Image (spheres, rainbow, N blue to C red):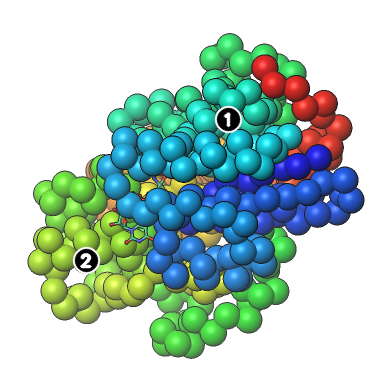
Amino acid sequence: MKILHVVGARPNFMKVAPVLHALSQYDTVRQIIVHTGQHYDVNMSDIFFQQLGIPAPDVNLEIGSASHAQQTAQIMARFEPVVLEQKPDMVLVYGDVNSTVAATLVCAKLLIPVAHVEAGLRSGDRTMPEEINRLVTDQLADLLFTPSGDGDQNLLREGIAAEKIHCVGNVMIDTLVRLQPAVADSAVLDELHLVPGGYAVLTLHRPSNVDDDRVLGALLGAILALAERLPIVFPVHPRTRHRLERLGLGLPPEGLRLIDPLGYLDFQRLTSQARIVLTDSGGIQEETSYLGIPCLTLRTNTERPVTVAMGTNMLVGNDLDRLRTRFHAILDGDDSWDQRPPGGIPLWDGHAAERIANILCKTKFVGT
Ligand code: UD1
């Protein structure tokens, strides 16, 4: 049985790692890794392969950055010959990035079965490029592995056959659980002169927050005011870095500390010891919920509602007053929602990838 994994962007890497490991326990499985090259900087890609123990990709399509149409089309054009040559029995795609949808489209046309890991998530917001990628990928996939029950409900509502859907839990949490000892060894707090609980972490990269100068400027103004009370560490995504340069944010003001994107271990150490996390990332809503760290999400919606219902996530949208109020409430210790015990979400237990491997190895691979 030949399984081909497609990854391309940073959030894919922590999802593929446990699945590769779980499938390596089966003698009958041969695995191939294709990296589309959607992310290519050392600290957006290579460092994750190294720290997560992912073997070097068998093929790198070296796509790089481009508009959505160009990036998706180029991945398709370069991926098709790889599939024709490799003839996999099944292709695994991860998450909701452009690489995910591009690979799925190629396989659907070649009648190669596709399994989607992290299926069924919906924000209901089609202005998000990821929502388009999720909708298309899930319609075309032959097997859909969901992280939580809401994913199953979304898929059933969209007419996906129940027998294709498997609620397996969250593979990103598998990686977080496995690497806890290595995370604890990270020296990032000492390097940044931080003490546990003595700072907040900020991440920002959604086009809706960073691509419009007025939106980004207003958000940063509010965040700078918060940083007067608690230092905020801000590992800056390359997309955001470009926007900040355009905005002319020169020397970072006192309190807000702009740093380069971190590797997996340092980033997890930083967030796990933070007093509060402010983010517009999807995966960080999940990781903070697992760890029990209060998370204020700078978005009006989330495709991960279980993190709000059962975790420590709260949506503050683009309401800067709400951001300010919630931030101070957490510091004043008068908020109850952030007191949830860590690790309480069903199937977020470090074993999701084993369940995936088990299902894959029992599945008869026939295209739809
Ligand atoms: C992509 C995903 C998003 C995910 C995010 C995680 C899509 C549609 N978006 O967004 O879902 O949350 O990755 O990081 O797939 N750049 C670099 N170096 C890199 C990669 C990117 O400098 O290694 C810069 C380029 O200027 C590029 C910009 O960042 O134009 C954005 O990269 P891109 O991959 O288009 O989208 P992300 O914002 O990273």
Q: Is residue 88 left or right of residue 314?
A: right
Q: Position of residue 164 (x, y in %)?
A: 70, 22
Mark found first going from the N terminus, 2 or 1: 1
**Residue 111 visible, this angle:** yes
Horizontal arrangement in the rendering, residue 354 relative to residue 334 (left or right): right
Q: Find out if the beta carbon at label 1 lies less than 8 Å from the nearest ligand 1 atom.
A: no
Secondary structure under tag 2 reads helix
Residue in view at x 57 percent, y 43 percent: 82
Residue that appears at 35% across and 27% down = 126
* Image position of 201 with respect to 298: above or below: below
| Amino acid at dot 2 | Leu
> How many numbered circles are shown?
2
**Looking at the image, is mark 2 or mark 1 nearer the viewer?**
1
- The quadrant the N terminus occupies is top right
| Residue denoted by label 1 | 107
Report the residue that reaches farthest toward the right. 27
Quadrant where the image shows the C terminus: top right
Against 240, residue 141 (above or below) is above
Q: Nearer the viewer, residue 109 or 304?
A: 109
Residue 89, how many percent across, how many down? 73, 34
Report the Cα–Cα distance between label 2 and label 1.
47 Å
Q: Which residue is mark 2?
A: 224
Residue found at x 30% / y 75%: 257
**177 to 311, vertically: above or below:** below
Write down the quadrant of residue 170 in the picture: top right
Q: Residue 165, image x and y in percent?
A: 69, 25
Secondary element type, mark 1: helix
The residue shown at (60%, 71%) is 50
